[in-house]
Amino acid sequence: MINKPKILIFIDWFTPGFKAGGPIKSISNIVNSLYHEFDFYIITSDRDIDDKTPYKNQQFNQWIKKTNYHIVYLSEIERKLFVSETLEKNEYSKIYFNSLYSKNYTLEPIQLIKKLKVTSGVIIAPRGMLGKGALKIKPIKKKVFLILTKNIGFFKEVTWHATDREESKDIKKAFGKKSQIITTPNISILNFDKKEISKTKNELQLVFFSRISPKKNLFYTLEILKKIDLQNLTLTIYGTLEDENYWKKCQEFITENKLNVQYLGELNPNQVNNTLSNYHLLFFPTLHENYGHVIVEALTAGCGLIISTNTPWRALNRINVGWDINLTDSNKFIEVIKGCYNMNQEEYNTIRNNCYEFIKTEIEKQNAVELTKKMFLQ
């Protein structure tokens, strides 16, 4: 048997957790696409994001063999010792960090790597955390962190995984032009189940699906809807309540303005495609996405897009799958929503069919699986 290169992955939350959204999807798609080429070992926490208790019916603090990877779910008490002992073995080809700011699953392990003089190549995926919109949230804290880590050379010997040219520019801006960067798109695994839904004039069913936090900009979504007084215009919200105060602000706004909006809770990954396929358009004016797995999932479900320009998915109206609009132009959002409201079945079917065709072509063109393989072998 040929020994495959071992890849050690650090991620704060992983399946069966799902509330962290895109980052979990990114790693799942990597290991499920490349397990024939590499042996993946995943180190993660023993609970989902913001949960007070660990997963039920799960083994902790020991390696578990899954179909496509090995994984360990660490308790807070055992975490440091287990990580230290794992790194001391120095048996991994690459060590991949799926976050920039994580104290437990990026910063402390990198300190240990330096201390133990581990020879594995270190790769960090910032996952959009250096984007302009993302840096607007807790800006002072992030600015201090970036200046400090750059000045002391904390990330000097790492390789950065950028998912596109814009993220590569963000990394260079934060850590210098000499930063070692590999630009490789996120891997997406398509799950097509084409479905037609009814669309008549003077009706529109919008969906917002993401973590409920300032970065995802739900409140802006609600402010736009307040300015549109149309019957049979609905918004359904799905997502984890990451920021309770922000959600309270949104709830109060919905009630005060009597908006036709409902929140239907969280979605498990196996519910996403079927759920999104029931809506006409995803309304997602995010502050920043370095990729936007929810955008891919919406397109795969045939759900058209009304999103901000703060994602890599641009010029959508040219290919007739939706619209990307600058957040400074609220009137354009209103104009587009009213136009969609007045669409008939034939006009809407064109958008829906274009979504299926566009995302299939786009994913094939990106060649992300081969590029990710090269990143781990480089």
Image (tube, rainbow, N blue to C red):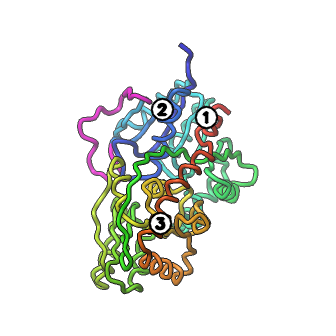
Earlier along the polypeptide chain: callout 3 or callout 1? 3
Q: What residue would you read off at disc 2?
A: 84
Q: CA distance from mark 1 to mark 2?
A: 27 Å
Where is residue 16 shown, x and y percent of the image? Answer: 33, 42
Q: CA distance from mark 3 to mark 1?
A: 31 Å
Earlier along the polypeptide chain: callout 1 or callout 2? 2
Look at 36% across and 36% down and name the residue there. 73
Look at 51% across and 68% down and name the residue there. 307
Look at 63% across and 47% down and name the residue there. 365
Q: Residue furthest right?
A: 178
Q: What residue would you read off at disc 1?
A: 373
Q: Quadrant of the C terminus?
A: top right
Of marks 3 and 1, the one in the foreground:
1
Q: Label 1 sits on what residue type?
A: Lys
Whether residue 113 sits left or right of residue 211 in the image: it is right
Q: Magenta stretch mostly in which secondary structure?
A: loop
Whether residue 228 sits left or right of residue 162 in the image: it is left
Q: Residue furthest left?
A: 57
Q: What residue would you read off at disc 3?
A: 215
Q: Residue furthest top?
A: 1
The circle on residue 12 is: none
Q: Does dot 3 land on a helix, a strand or a loop?
A: helix
Residue toward you, 324 or 133: 324
Of marks 2 and 3, the one in the foreground:
3
Q: Which residues are magenta?
A: 47-69
Q: Does dot 2 land on a helix, a strand or a loop?
A: helix
Q: Label 2 sits on what residue type?
A: Ser
